[in-house]
Amino acid sequence: MVDYHVHTTFSDGEKTPEEVINMAVSLGIEKLAITDHFDAFDPGLSRDQKTTGELLRHFDKIRNLAAGSSITVYCGIETCTDESGHLRVERECKSACDIIITSPHYIEGSYPFRRGEYFCDAYWQAYKKKLLLMAEGEGDVLGHPEGYLPIGPMLGEGTTYEGRQEICRKISESYFDPPFIQELGKRLKKSGKAYELHGATKTPREWVVEALAKQDVLFSPGSDAHNVNILGKNERAIELVKKYNLHLYEPGRGCTSRNKIDKIGK
């Protein structure tokens, strides 16, 4: 069992690295990637942004804890690129990471948002353009392209978590059609970047996985656990790996460590 997308108290997770690693061991997770948020440009981060030095000390702590553990633990970050798919972190940070997940948490620019209205064509066309550039850009994994869509500026009052995920599903069905997925797969294959099988939102849609698998795109299972309740909850990913004989990305030191295939779960 692997889980390549997990958060701790370093960003917005509920548990310390030690607690997360201990829980992962008890759950039978064999390979774990701790990928805390690290993005000075993200308007949605609720906590104070850390420095590169603090991140490197965080990695040192994780690696020391992992040395006394029975499982493999990777260090990484979850961040968003600029409009062109380039990372906005220091070279020292890139070199220290085993895995970098680039998730489209926000879209640059101004748009005519209205609360409770979610189908702003200009916004979602910009989102699609950014996804394509992220697919061929820096980083190792394209994080949750169909889950946790950046709908914050449009949210109406009282929207539940389940309601937000239903909104994201409808947006995906409306905008992310087969020609777009085909082009996304083409760019992922060219760059060697993996597409995330996102445990928390059970995305992407199965036909998307099948389409990308036909293009021999790599995949990366990640629960996106902010608390231990969903740590390792990648059952859907395991089913899809077996059903479509998916090739899985495996982390390695240094950004863009591409084309490594993890056989676990196959």
Image (tube, rainbow, N blue to C red):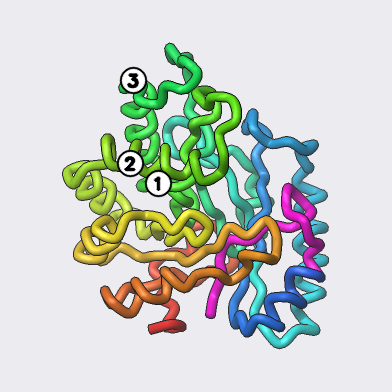
Determine if the magenta segment contains residue 4: yes
- CA gap between label 1 and label 2 equals 6 Å
Helix, strand or loop at label 1? It is loop
Disc 2 packing (10 Å; few <14; some 14–19; many ≥20): some
Residue identifier under label 2: 172
Query: Residue 174: percent from the left, percent from the top?
Result: 27, 36
Question: How many other residues sit within 10 Å of disc 1, few (<14), some (14-19) or many (≥20)?
Answer: many
> Seen in the image, is 184 located left or right of residue 22?
left
Based on the picture, tell me whether residue 137 belongs to the magenta stretch: no
Residue at 56 percent across and 55 percent down: it is 100
Which residue in the rendered view is the most extreme toward the left?
A: 179
Q: Earlier in the sequence, mark 1 or mark 2?
A: 1
Spot the residue most to the top: 112
Q: Amino acid at mark 3?
A: Ala
Report the disc number at residue 122: 3
Asked if the residues shown at circle 3 and circle 1 are in contact, with their CB atoms under 8 angstroms apart, the answer is no
Residue 47 pos. (x, y %): 77, 38
Count of picture labels = 3
Q: Three-letter amino acid code at disc 1?
A: Glu
Q: Residues within 10 Å of mark 3 (few under 14, many from 20)?
A: few
The image position of residue 40, as x and y in percent, is: 68, 34
Which element type, helix, strand or loop, lies under badge 2? helix
Check if mark 1's residue and mark 2's residue have beta carbons within 8 Å.
yes
Q: Give left or right: position of 75 versus 167.
A: right
Front residue of 54 and 71: 71
Q: Which residue is mark 1?
A: 146
Q: Earlier in the sequence, mark 3 or mark 2?
A: 3
Identify the residue at image location x=58%, y=45%. Answer: 79
The span picked out in magenta is 1-18
Mark 3 or 1, nearer chain start? 3
